[in-house]
Amino acid sequence: MTTVLVTGGGGLVGKAVQEVIAQSPPANEAWVFATSKDADLTNYESAKALFQRHKPTHVLHLAARVGGLFSNMKYKVEFWRDNISMQENIFRLCKEFEVAKLVSCLSTCVFPDKTTYPIDETMIHNGPPHNSNLGYAYAKRMVDVVNHLHNEQYGCMYTSVVPTNIFGKHDNFSIDDGHVIPGLIHKCYNAMNSGQPFVVWGSGKPLRQFIFSKDLAALMIWVVRHYQEVDPIILSVDEASEVTIEQVARSICAAMGFQGELVLDSSKADGQLKKTASNAKLRRYLPDFQFTPFDEAVKETVEWFKANYATVRK
């Protein structure tokens, strides 16, 4: 019997994995979704008690300290410390409990700031990441390093996935600390209810590849079951699906039914102009995978946010 322990099980991606698994429950797998209420993963003894309770054969490590551009800029030390602590405990416990496979989640912000595009899995360590998220990015880069160390020394099957920008239901819709799409959804909602303009920070020109959480969940489940490389794999929509932040804002307006004024505040920071990622490796494995169309995914997210406004993270 396979037992898959999912850390960060109450977060955006964890909830999506839970939803996908529930739609077609596997006969020979038990999936355990742990949240911060179940264990403090920055504390070894607390994390060990979680492993002792469930005795996982596989671990999907999604738990992390995450945040948007401005949160990353403000708390670089905390982003480094918390993520390194979690990762070290997960690595140590996977080795102690003889976990057959560990899949950790990185982010495209780990890639070098100065690089050629599209970025691919071979380029992670080619130069420093963007200064806006040094703490988080360097902490997450270390996952790839330590995966290889464990494989070379012990033969462990530890690997990592690199999603592009994720959005969907169960996200953190905080305007101050959330990522771009959930933050903008909340801002647009407030603007519509107050009759004020919908103000988007930045020029609206940066380009991003956004992946819907349910699509990402399906791909992560595939990685847990079938992907057998230590080297990371980028989980992303195709390059042709890249959109500007202004396009994102307009899609949110359409989904929300907002007909007021949209303002792009160019006095605010944009972050990286682009970080286009190649999903060629993923396409070699899964050439026919169908991603949810962007506007459809935004509409589903906006409708969920409105229906659950009282209880969403914000």
Image: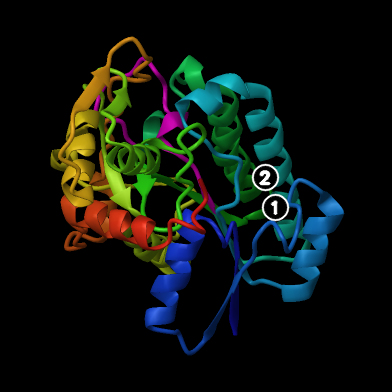
Residue closer to the observer: 263 or 140: 263
Q: Write the residue at 72% across / 74% down.
A: 54
Numbered range of the magenta stretch: 104-120
Tell me the colour scheme of the image: rainbow
Q: Which residue is mark 2?
A: 87
Quarter holding the N terminus is bottom right
Q: Crowding at label 2, few (<14), some or many (≥20) Cα neighbours within 10 Å?
A: many
Magenta residues, dominant SS class: loop
Looking at the image, residue 238 lies above or below residue 102 = above
In the displayed structure image, the side of residue 32 where residue 19 appears, left or right: left
* Callout 1 touching callout 2 (CB < 8 Å): yes
| 105 drawn magenta | yes
Across and down, in percent, residue 165 comes to: 36, 41
Spatial CA distance of label 1 from label 2 is 5 Å
Q: Amino acid at mark 1?
A: Ile
Mark identifier at residue 90: 1
42 left or right, relative to 35: right
